[in-house]
Image (cartoon, grey):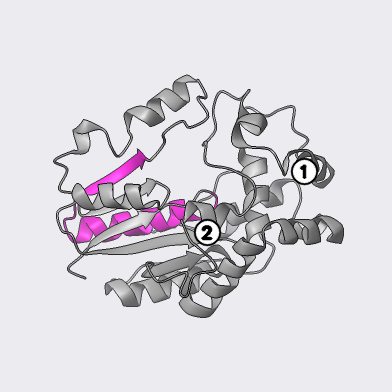
Amino acid sequence: MVNKNIIYIKTPKCGSTSVKHQLLDYSRKHGMKVLDGATGFKNEHNLKSPYLSNLSKNNIFAQKHNNGNYNISLSHVTATDDNISRLVNIMEKKDYLLISSIREPLDRLISNYMGTPHTPQWDKTEMGFTKWYLNNKDKNVKQIYGNLERFFPDFWMNNFLCNYLNIDINSDDPLKKYDFITITEHYSESMKNLSKLLGHDFKVEVKNETKPFNISELVVDCWGRPQGGIGIGKKFKLDDLSDEIKKMYREDNSDDYKLYDMCLNRFL
């Protein structure tokens, strides 16, 4: 066990629930106090729903966390400087490992599209996704999701991963602040490498790491249970999209693809 706190930036739709369960197993073994399910949600677009009200109540800045003395944070919190500083202040130690997860960028967006609740009007096919993307790719969160009662509000469109992980892709060392980042398409290898970092033998089994894949079939947690909710393989796969759409998405999200390639080179 490392003698540091762990801050896990739980990136939505990147297999982060599976990683979270692995880290929960790690925390139980070592008697660590866990901050689980907190958010950094600030409702910048003034969206109103009971779901968003609950997110606000469990914000990491809430007073109930002031004397948390946590050892590990496992939450959907963007990696802004303010959020990281707050997490450090409510944790037992000031030394920490910063860990997160990423996924092939377009694959992640498809998973978000397929899994967004309360969207029966959305055509969950490759043609439906294509039309939705072309219509929404330049809109903000409120314009896309403002009429929905329940959704996680940080699903902006372009360069989501760089924004969520708070990475300046043009800096000298964009990944400098991260100790480790898991990669969804290489889940088992990622967890093996994380085992080496933490000195903990994570029990990971996968069926077949191919791409594209249905994450709900591929990833299992530390108890062998499938994770991932509504997987992209339920309706269509990444390869079903036209080359034109894939090229357009890559051009619109070039920073995310640079980040993805950097992570492949550094953490595998």
Q: In the image, which is nearer the foreground, mark 1 or mark 2?
A: 1
Relative to 175, 125 lies left or right: right
Amino acid type shown at disc 1: Phe
Specify the quadrant of the image occupied by residue 41: top left
Q: Which residue is mark 2?
A: 219
- Which stretch did the figure color magenta? 13-39
How crowded pointer 2 is (Cα within 10 Å; few <14, some 14-19, many 20+) is rated as many
Disc assigned to residue 129: 1
- Indicate the position of residue 99 as horizontal and vertical percent values: 38, 62
In reply to whether residue 244 is colored magenta, the answer given is no
Please name the residue shown 21% across and 70% down the image: 2
On screen, residue 115 above or below 100: above
Please name the residue shown 46% across and 54% down the image: 16
- Indicate the position of residue 142 as horizontal and vertical percent values: 60, 30
Specify the quadrant of the image occupied by residue 136: top right
Relative to 21, 257 lies left or right: right
Camera-side residue of 65 and 254: 254
Question: Circle 1 sits in a helix, a strand or a loop, which is it?
Answer: helix
On screen, residue 238 above or below 205: above
How crowded pointer 1 is (Cα within 10 Å; few <14, some 14-19, many 20+) is rated as some
Q: Quadrant of the N terminus?
A: bottom left
Please name the residue shown 72% across and 44% down the image: 137
Mark 1–mark 2 Cα distance, whole angstroms, equals 24 Å
- Indicate the position of residue 85 as horizontal and vertical percent values: 27, 51
Question: Circle 2 sits in a helix, a strand or a loop, which is it?
Answer: loop
Is residue 208 in view? no
Amino acid type shown at disc 2: Val
